[in-house]
Image (cartoon, coloured by chain):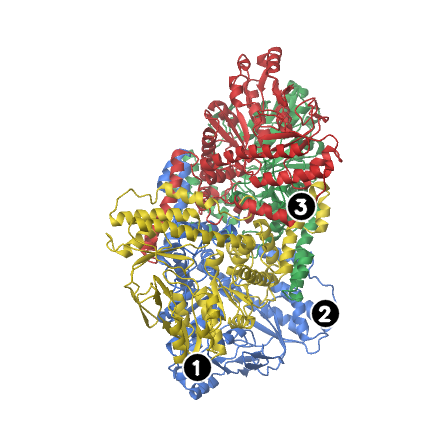
Chain colours: A green, B red, C yellow, D blue
Amino acid sequence: MNETSYKLAERLVPTTYLHQASESRTAREKLIRILMEQHKCPEEGWDDATIELFLNDLALMDSNNFPHNCGVGEREARIYSGLVSKRHYRLGHGIGRSGDIAEVQPKAAGSSLLNKLTNCMVLDVIRATGVRKTAACLVVPLATGMSMVLCLLTVRQQRPDAKYVIWPRIDQKSCFKAIITAGFEPVVIENCLDGDELRTDVAEIDRQITSLKPESIAAVMTTTSCFAPRGIDKLEDALAVNSYRQCKTNIGVYRVGRVDAFVQSTDKNFMVPVGGAVIAGFDSAFIQQVGKMYPGRASGSPVVDLFITLLSMGIRGHKKLLEERKALKSLLTQRMEGVAEKYGLRVLNTKNNPISIAMTLPENLNIPLTELGSRLFLRGVSGTRVIRTSDDKMIAGTRFIGWGSHSKSYPYAYLTAAASIGMTEEDVDLFIQRLDKCLEKFTGTKNTKETYGSENDVTRRDSKSYTRGSKGEING
Amino acid sequence: MNETSYKLAERLVPTTYLHQASESRTAREKLIRILMEQHKCPEEGWDDATIELFLNDLALMDSNNFPHNCGVGEREARIYSGLVSKRHYRLGHGIGRSGDIAEVQPKAAGSSLLNKLTNCMVLDVIRATGVRKTAACLVVPLATGMSMVLCLLTVRQQRPDAKYVIWPRIDQKSCFKAIITAGFEPVVIENCLDGDELRTDVAEIDRQITSLKPESIAAVMTTTSCFAPRGIDKLEDALAVNSYRQCKTNIGVYRVGRVDAFVQSTDKNFMVPVGGAVIAGFDSAFIQQVGKMYPGRASGSPVVDLFITLLSMGIRGHKKLLEERKALKSLLTQRMEGVAEKYGLRVLNTKNNPISIAMTLPENLNIPLTELGSRLFLRGVSGTRVIRTSDDKMIAGTRFIGWGSHSKSYPYAYLTAAASIGMTEEDVDLFIQRLDKCLEKFTGTKNTKETYGSENDVTRRDSKSYTRGSKGEING
Amino acid sequence: MNETSYKLAERLVPTTYLHQASESRTAREKLIRILMEQHKCPEEGWDDATIELFLNDLALMDSNNFPHNCGVGEREARIYSGLVSKRHYRLGHGIGRSGDIAEVQPKAAGSSLLNKLTNCMVLDVIRATGVRKTAACLVVPLATGMSMVLCLLTVRQQRPDAKYVIWPRIDQKSCFKAIITAGFEPVVIENCLDGDELRTDVAEIDRQITSLKPESIAAVMTTTSCFAPRGIDKLEDALAVNSYRQCKTNIGVYRVGRVDAFVQSTDKNFMVPVGGAVIAGFDSAFIQQVGKMYPGRASGSPVVDLFITLLSMGIRGHKKLLEERKALKSLLTQRMEGVAEKYGLRVLNTKNNPISIAMTLPENLNIPLTELGSRLFLRGVSGTRVIRTSDDKMIAGTRFIGWGSHSKSYPYAYLTAAASIGMTEEDVDLFIQRLDKCLEKFTGTKNTKETYGSENDVTRRDSKSYTRGSKGEING
Amino acid sequence: MNETSYKLAERLVPTTYLHQASESRTAREKLIRILMEQHKCPEEGWDDATIELFLNDLALMDSNNFPHNCGVGEREARIYSGLVSKRHYRLGHGIGRSGDIAEVQPKAAGSSLLNKLTNCMVLDVIRATGVRKTAACLVVPLATGMSMVLCLLTVRQQRPDAKYVIWPRIDQKSCFKAIITAGFEPVVIENCLDGDELRTDVAEIDRQITSLKPESIAAVMTTTSCFAPRGIDKLEDALAVNSYRQCKTNIGVYRVGRVDAFVQSTDKNFMVPVGGAVIAGFDSAFIQQVGKMYPGRASGSPVVDLFITLLSMGIRGHKKLLEERKALKSLLTQRMEGVAEKYGLRVLNTKNNPISIAMTLPENLNIPLTELGSRLFLRGVSGTRVIRTSDDKMIAGTRFIGWGSHSKSYPYAYLTAAASIGMTEEDVDLFIQRLDKCLEKFTGTKNTKETYGSENDVTRRDSKSYTRGSKGEING
């Protein structure tokens, strides 16, 4: 309803009743106006009603939703199924344009605006909650692995003679495969053992750079989040490490001597479904170049998810999640130490890993170690990993000894757990309880009746999730 | 409700009334069972109720929806916003696994099943409606350009020494950019003029293969759908063309002497939002290789759209759309010939282009030609292109004379329109009417009152779209 | 987005692309403005996007959706479940106010506006498609029976001494029960047989009025839609019938000598779920009085359904449905005559029933007549009735001989079918086919394999419903 | 998916991954089975996924959703608009059958089951949280006023000679109007002042019963929830009060000497949209009789809301809400006492009103008292009432002196606030803050800047509602 319609409403409903309605509308429109003005993630999250209002507004700005549209020759955004149309809020054009995924799409002013605003909000959140000096970012409908491929292909374009990507070993397949897919040759840097913890062998990186020649090295690629007992490589350290500086060449996800781009998945950082990533960096030109490497339009779905979620969360909501995660990491460590003590085990000392925790496992279980993992999995504990150190694996022609443990010869078998954002105290309780049950059972310490699958469990789950719920709805 | 619950229902509702309900349920479950058995797109589309029933069933098979789930360490599929969760039917895990986009995800049996079934159905549809001998296909959450990059990167892996991609010129930016992004050197083959029509210069391809050496050529890449007056290169022709055969090397989207892979966007072919593509081919091994090149999980959103749409459409619905499109192509040509005659123009003779139609434009308009295009656009005609032949453009270092016309020296200025699937007879009517108005106005032939934006137009649009609507709902 | 926000959007998206978006928005707002101005059902239906836009606008005008709301002491419109809130578009206040269901609710300007507009649109539709002189109407969240009770209670208020309601027998239980519930004594007028048809015995009504005294008669109540072979009493006839005039007293659904109010269910006339009715009449004061009789607020749900449906249908859509229904009545009659002939039966001649058709049944079936009905029902034929004339029934103390046949002694057993709005030609085909199968089987004429429950049937159903679908969506 | 389909899934997804999915499904089906077995509101609420699963199951049991349905003659449950169908989960048949709103509908086994289960769950909740001896209940799609009419009409049926309804004055219009609408004559019993509190004058009821004769009295009707300073009449007291016993006749909402039926609105007690009520009592036969008085089917919408909400809440959730309400009543009283003290006012002593609180108002405000109310309203305080004691009102022929204050001569002007279920501590904070601001401003005590409408307020609201949200969703 525009102003005229509001005025006309007075013929049916007394002005006094309409007054407040109009003020309420103004309050919502103000939220939208501020976003359009400042291009920042709101400090406080919006309620769902305002978010949907805005989404509908944006959708109606796309040509496929124009009442007078005549799509002869138009081949996009004709949507067959009403279910599909509904779930995309009638947005059908995706994002980007043939030459550049960041470009505005003439037929889709609404989708384009949504895309721009999401990129602005993500940049704002990254700056506010961590990497203050980030210059630019790009939300892509690609998971992290493929995003790294895109970055590496951009490097290849700029430095066609570079052949190698140096990779401090962190046993996550998609990182490693990204190097292969992008057509580079990986140079694996094995880790050093520092107490319980595995750390990047910086000296070896140095040696390799010198030996292979800086100009032949496309990038050093690392991961700032990984399973313990690997410690992570902090972005700041990478920026600071002197040895990298000598190398003039570089680029990639993690450029030698400085960081050119960093990639983070949207699902793990912003609690949306799998499928998107943020490519960010300190040099706008490089990020722009990455955008131009993506040939053609792309799915807008991960962007829509992020748009909704950031508006719903607000900066404050995001910070709160990060703080909760941190507190739960402490709690989880403490509780795992309790279990460890009970069974004569110990939590590994991995002070450089802020998310993941590793605990040693008993040597003489009644069942094979792998079985322990699958038993936990069957009990609904879906995020732990049990690592025997003896596994070997061939990946794209490279043989990894001890795959999964980040090391050829890690001294212990262990189990990892992690505190990711969105986790709750009740998750910790349930995990500890089930882990205890499993160890009790398989070490033969004692045998108690299991609670798995009992109604009891279901209800616990329910009461937990109650506290989350859809943000900002009176009613969810 | 399971059988026991049905039985218990008899305590509240008479058995006779339940009997039919139970039969109805059985009928729906039978549809699902047949799909699970045959892995084929149903001949007849399903109604929305059955589709949603199945989607919910699948979602509840993913670990994030397990009532007893305890996600300590689980970092995916925690969804913050209820709006986001809802629009993904509570599916959060995306598709694929770190090493392979086609692989099953252990934590997401439902998403994995959905992905597998969608791939099976797409393969079935491709075989049923065109390319009978297709051996395998892969639905990816990438638009066509990026899908071609993935194919070319797969080729690079297999034939690291090939440097060139031969590209018979078809002026669509994303195809050309895909070559660049994948790190190859494009060899542009200019077209021959055959009457009004521009055709691939097969002899020149031959010459280039010989001259550059077959082993250095990664692929010949072409497009089977393009704007007139370019004629398309048919897959069958490519398979048959003798000259390609001599070249043993090849690969890519369109391999020399045979076709290794063909890529089609899901939005243009299956009426879903922009964002997905199908990579298909005649050799399963190659398609499998492409899947393995995608490092990590990916967005499941385009797959969900396709899943819903194919179930809703059925083979019959898809064939019907193709037939309607064909009939409307004839109608559109005929109606454009009518307009052409009125203004002393003509429809170009491009018998090898089954979708797009080009019509010459008057030389002495009252406005510049580009203006004509934007006026049509403002009148809601969003799918036409006006081509002056004098445009030049630099793309990634290559200069194209006459960009947009597929030719350095096409003799006429022209306008294109196309009959894509989902178009209706009313779209044709509206287009012809508005085109006529525009030409009338700008050639000065006569000046009549415009109808653009009038309520009249809106209503016409509405009554048209009525015949589409959500498939298989009593009520939509 | 307001104007300022649109302006600010230009910093992210070029003005030219926004221009059309803005025009499109204006076009939609114009539709809303016209509705607010004219208070009439739009001639052409709106698309779903515009309807939802408007619904959201209205919901945000209710106090429970005010961002600054503080509901201390507020006891309505706090909605616990997000699913519930969503399905009501966040509307929670219902309609009406303690003293009057038609009154505006101060805390719910949006709901009140929606209610007023719906009432205006319904009045417009009634006038446009039938009863031109209707002065006022009231949409109530009561089915027809309870709506008649409300009308009769209003009469009671005005004429406390009237005791009787004269009821020309039409065997539908809820009409009859309405008289009892309202506390009146029914005077049943048995029908006359006129050829095959049962008609109201006007002379007997006359006699009863005279005998019981006009002042003791609250109303004559009849039904303008019923199962054949009963002919209906047309409103116009009632208005014209002389004999009623002499009676000064009256009131009710059908007042003696004139019609005071007529009630129609919203589900049967406007294709919404069961649960609402329209109470309309030629004297605004009486209808207003009915509104004031409803003590307290009421469910807004049936009003919302009607609001959406009328906007989606438009006057044109409604007229089209009525025309289709009429045409299908002819077709259905003709096809039933075909079946009748085959089995030596006949379609009863009931020219005064525009909706329902009755066909005689064979006397010596292999199964009891009632069984025939239930067999048809099990074959998905849910709208037919098989009438043996021998049934007796006690309803609220009154014994009805031949209940279901509108007559104590109707000469034939028969089956009825009807052409209601929303029916399709394919419904007719399916019905005739199944009726034929049943008769064939049970008369022993021939025995063929049954198709019930076969996939064939399911698909037929599906292809039929395809032509309906969600109105006004590009994509359904 | 049935068992066979699950088995077939193993051809696409490894059995181990399917194992858990199947267990998870079993867990949900178990919840449903327990409900079907026990007919009780679950102790713990279900998550939304399970609720929607069950709703879809039920909808598919209705004939309008049968794939093989052929609705010739079927006039209900054809739904025109997809938006309408969706919001009713494809349920279209409403509840009840022509003669009885509690009866099973043959064409709608699913709707009927849903209705039965909802009635069972409501009965269970009423017994669990208050009125233990309740024998039966009936959920009706009528607000409280109309539900009382239905009860009174049932009484009229049973005792046609009773004329009066005795009504201890409680100034809520719809109660009083219900008496009138049902055709009875109200006998108003003015209240006694007991300290600050207004209480029912039991002796006067006694006198009236004797004077008018027990047999002429249809019922004594009272309200167990009302605005302070009226104290409420407790059900238990009514059951115990000796004086009522002597009167053998009666009936209604509150029968003399015992309670025959009590009516509660679903919106105020179960946090659903306005529009439904529960009619309950200690004698099943009477409640059944009420159900039979409702002629015809009725809207199923309020029942669906209640069904969803009770499953989502569970007994535990409901109890929690009641406890929170009780605690907030104490808090609110305490905080209002704080404000009262500041302005030389006092909270009235009304120990028999468990929900509503009254506070005296200053005599010499700068603005009229009514203005104070509307200023609060404009500040989003929508649940308070300001009562001057001088208002007179004619309602249906009866003149009430001091309408709104439950008394002809209440000694003070006052303001009421109430603690209803669903209220939060933050609501109390906001209210106190705004009340303070208003009093400050209008008593001239001090003038501070207002915060109304500031972004600050909006955000406070948002963070508050965060804790509610959709029950049982991981993600809301």
Q: Alpha-carbon neighbours of circle 2 within 10 Å: few (<14), some, or many (≥20)?
A: some
Q: Are marks 2 and 3 in contact (CB under 8 Å)?
A: no
Looking at the rendered image, the disc whose residue lies closer to the viewer, 3 or 1, is: 3
Label number found at residue B451? 3
Label number found at residue D208? none
Name the subunit of mark 1.
Answer: D
Residue B172: x %, y % from top left: 63, 28
Asked if residue A423 is positioned above or below residue B246 in the image, the reply reads below
Asked if residue D316 is positioned above or below residue B106 in the image, the reply reads below
User: Viewed as shown, does residue B36 lie left or right of A429?
Assistant: left
Tell me the residue that label 1 is attached to. Answer: D163
- How far is mark 3 from mark 1, CA to CA? 68 Å
User: Viewed as shown, does residue D407 lie left or right of D133?
Assistant: right
- How far is mark 1 from mark 2, CA to CA? 52 Å
Q: Residue at x 52, y 47 (%)?
A: B86
Name the subunit of mark 3.
Answer: B
Out of A148 and D378, give the one closest to the viewer: D378
Q: Alpha-carbon neighbours of circle 3 within 10 Å: few (<14), some, or many (≥20)?
A: few
Residue C67: x %, y % from top left: 63, 58
SS state under label 3: loop
Tell me the residue that label 2 is attached to. Answer: D441
User: Viewed as shown, does residue D453 lie left or right of D244?
Assistant: right
Q: Mark 1 or 2 closer to N-term?
A: 1
User: Viewed as shown, does residue A233 lie left or right of C370?
Assistant: right
Looking at the rendered image, the disc whose residue lies closer to the viewer, 1 or 2, is: 1
Q: What amino acid does circle 1 point to?
A: Lys
Q: Residue at x 69, y 71 (%)?
A: D439
Name the subunit of mark 2.
Answer: D
SS state under label 1: loop
Q: What amino acid does circle 3 point to?
A: Thr
